[in-house]
Image (cartoon, coloured by chain):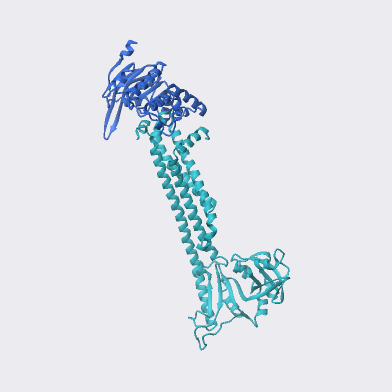
């Protein structure tokens, strides 16, 4: 197939007809460039939203308390609602089937942590081992808190990656003792968290330990849980509504009171985000296909025009002994060559542009705009195939007409 | 060299068909210098196109170099044209983005001859038509007479059996016409069969044999004075 003479002939034709070559090349390069840019920016938007809503399990529910805003059953408004250990028992017995992971939380901010010469202030959370899947924390070294730790009120902690970095640097943290507000705790593990920097500055200790340390009796701050992932979004919402209602009853809160018992179900947000992502995905795909189709139509038009313009030349070539096959082959090779080179150029420019401006787009809600190589190469190949077909049909027709008709074409 | 028996050709025009060639018989021997005379519409161009394998005939027999031409597909026709026939057209039909040398060399490309050899052969034929110095000029930089000489060099470059010239002087003034006809005569003297189509009496007089065509039939076929004298 490789025939130097043939390529020389093709290069000459392309070179001597620069305007034509540039026009058709430009169409392809521009289509691929647009495709890459739009697709990349679309992906950037998608990344933003994924990042925005990442970090916690999508099926998580957090139960907070506050002050009542309405008087109820003879109780005044402005009363602080306080969850206690029996609230946990209550929930677990009522919603055994709905709850997957469950953990109470006692949170204490601004705790001074000291390891040898290094010190800093962090938020300490007293939790159950189930808190790990709730936060989607990933253990990097050692382990997370265990059921036994909770039972024994062990003075152990799991620290975030950044806490470890602050206090230990490159040194090993697991097994070392840290002082928290003067009390010594043993580090059992280091975790990372997809939720980002803030989530990696927490220190987790067993719930029972924290309760003994920071609370006078069996009080707790809030509760996190994940619902059974088999539940649909609507089922999960009715579960959290029912939970809210029952807690309000239990704590003698007006059913219309929005402040005292606050249940935040992530599924609500998840539902919106998923719908939004679906639409966004659809738009991206639509734009991608649209650009490609525009490119295909462009290159088809140009190929039809080129072959039409060259009808007479093709007639001359045939009179001089060119076979139909060599005519079709010549036009297709020209077409493939131009589309491939131009497509590759557009691809390089597009990917280069995304790289160059990518980081400066963050303020426009576009994070890391990029396109998978396979996607762009696929798009380029589609355009090359389209260019080939677009060239083949008129070339075949031109090669088929009698040379005398082609010669008479003006 | 060229033998035609009862050749018919008609073109469809809407629902009707126009009967252009009505049973021609013609025999041209190797080395002849023949002109076909006729007014426009007499069918002379159609005849040349069929002889040149640029068009097909409806019925009758056509032998080129002893080979019966029938059921030719485009590929076979292209190969036969390349091997046996050289064309000279009224409008030159040079490829405008190729220079004189490349135009002349093009038929050799379709014979699969290497680039260097192609250019050497093409140069030899450009020299023959006196255009060595113009080898690297584009057709747009050449005069009409020069273009036609490039076309003639291109027709000769494959050493065909027959040179077919369709109104070769139609676009030229009388001085250049004469030099082109001199060139064709010279080629003929070297033994090439030359087949010219023209409607100009004085051009036809330059050839050895005139076949007159009217309304698709041959009305006369005679040797010219020149040939009789010779």
Where residue A390 sits, quadrant-wise, is: top left
- Height in image: A309 above or below B41? below
Q: Quadrant of the N terminus of chain B?
A: top left
Residue B71 screen position, x and y as percent: 39, 27
Q: In this view of the protein, which residue sits in the foreground, A100 or A166? A: A166
Residue B4 screen position, x and y as percent: 34, 20
Q: Please report the residue visible at 45 percent of the width from the left and 43 percent of the height from the top.
A: A22
Residue A362 can be seen in this image? yes
Q: In this view of the protein, which residue sits in the foreground, A217 or B152? A: B152
Chain B shown in which color?
Answer: blue
Q: Residue furthest top?
A: B229
- Height in image: B115 above or below B25? below
Q: Please report the residue visible at 33 percent of the width from the left and 13 percent of the height from the top.
A: B227
Chain cyan in the figure, letter: A
Where residue B36 sits, quadrant-wise, is: top left
Q: Residue furthest bottom?
A: A74
Residue A368 can be seen in this image? no
Q: Please report the residue visible at 63 percent of the width from the left and 69 percent of the height from the top.
A: A201
Left or right for A382, reference B210: right
Q: Quadrant of the C terminus of chain B?
A: top left
Residue A404 screen position, x and y as percent: 36, 30
- Height in image: B48 above or below A165? above
Left or right for A141, reference A314: right
Left or right for A219, reference B58: right
């Amino acid at each position: 197939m490789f025939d130097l003479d043939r390529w020389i002939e093709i290069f000459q034709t392309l070179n001597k007809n620069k305007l034509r070559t540039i026009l058709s090349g430009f169409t392809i390069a521009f289509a691929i460039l647009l495709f890459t840019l739009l697709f990349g920016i679309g992906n950037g938007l998608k990344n933003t939203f994924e990042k925005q809503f990442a970090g916690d399990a999508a099926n998580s529910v957090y139960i907070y308390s506050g002050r009542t805003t309405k008087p109820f059953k003879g109780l005044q408004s402005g009363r602080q609602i306080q969850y206690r250990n029996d609230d946990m028992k209550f929930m677990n017995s009522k919603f055994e089937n709905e709850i997957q992971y469950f953990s109470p939380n006692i949170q204490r901010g601004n705790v001074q942590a000291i390891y040898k010469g290094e010190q800093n202030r962090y938020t300490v959370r007293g939790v159950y081992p189930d808190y790990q899947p709730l936060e989607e924390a990933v253990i990097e070294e050692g382990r997370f808190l265990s059921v036994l730790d909770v039972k024994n009120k062990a003075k152990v902690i799991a620290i975030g990656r950044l806490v470890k970095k602050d206090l230990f640097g490159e040194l090993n943290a697991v097994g070392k003792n840290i002082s928290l507000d003067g009390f010594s705790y043993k580090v059992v593990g280091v975790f990372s968290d997809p939720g980002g920097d803030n989530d990696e500055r927490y220190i987790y200790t067993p719930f029972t330990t924290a309760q003994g340390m920071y609370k006078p009796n069996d009080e707790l701050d809030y509760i996190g849980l994940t619902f059974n992932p088999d539940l649909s979004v609507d089922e999960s919402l009715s579960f959290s509504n029912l939970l809210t209602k029952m807690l309000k009853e239990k704590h003698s809160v007006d059913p219309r009171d929005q402040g005292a018992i606050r249940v935040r179900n992530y599924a609500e947000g998840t539902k919106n985000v998923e719908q939004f992502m679906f639409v966004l995905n659809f738009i991206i795909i639509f734009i991608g296909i649209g650009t490609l189709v525009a490119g295909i139509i462009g290159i088809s038009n140009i190929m039809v025009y080129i072959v039409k313009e060259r009808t007479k030349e093709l007639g001359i070539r045939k009179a001089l002994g060119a076979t139909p096959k060599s005519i079709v082959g010549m036009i297709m090779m020209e077409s493939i060559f131009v589309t491939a080179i131009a497509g590759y150029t557009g691809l390089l420019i597009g990917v280069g542009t995304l790289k160059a401006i990518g980081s400066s787009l963050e303020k426009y809600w576009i994070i890391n705009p990029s396109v998978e190589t396979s996607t762009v190469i696929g798009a380029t190949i589609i355009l090359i195939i389209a260019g080939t077909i677009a060239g083949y049909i008129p070339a075949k027709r031109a090669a088929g007409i009698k040379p005398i008709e082609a010669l008479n074409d003006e | 060299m060229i033998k035609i028996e009862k050749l018919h050709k008609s073109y469809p025009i809407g629902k009707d068909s126009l009967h252009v060639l009505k049973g021609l018989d013609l025999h041209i021997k190797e080395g002849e210098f023949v002109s076909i005379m006729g007014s426009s519409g007499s069918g002379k161009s159609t005849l040349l196109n069929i002889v040149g394998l640029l068009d097909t005939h409806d019925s009758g027999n056509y032998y080129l170099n002893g080979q019966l031409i029938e059921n030719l597909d485009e590929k076979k026709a292209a190969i036969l044209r390349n091997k046996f026939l050289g064309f000279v057209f009224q409008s030159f039909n040079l490829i405008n983005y190729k220079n004189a040398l490349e135009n002349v060399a093009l038929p050799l490309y379709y014979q699969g001859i290497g680039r260097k050899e192609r250019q050497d052969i093409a140069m030899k034929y450009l020299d023959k038509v006196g255009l060595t110095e113009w080898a690297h000029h584009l057709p747009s930089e050449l005069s009409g007479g020069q273009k036609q000489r490039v076309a003639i060099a291109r027709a000769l470059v494959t050493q065909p059996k027959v040179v077919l010239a369709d109104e070769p002087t139609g676009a030229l003034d009388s001085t250049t016409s004469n030099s082109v006809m001199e060139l064709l005569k010279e080629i003929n003297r070297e033994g090439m069969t030359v087949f010219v189509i023209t409607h100009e009496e004085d051009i036809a007089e330059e050839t050895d044999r005139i076949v007159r065509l009217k309304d698709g039939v041959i009305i006369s076929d005679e040797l010219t004075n020149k040939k009789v004298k010779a």
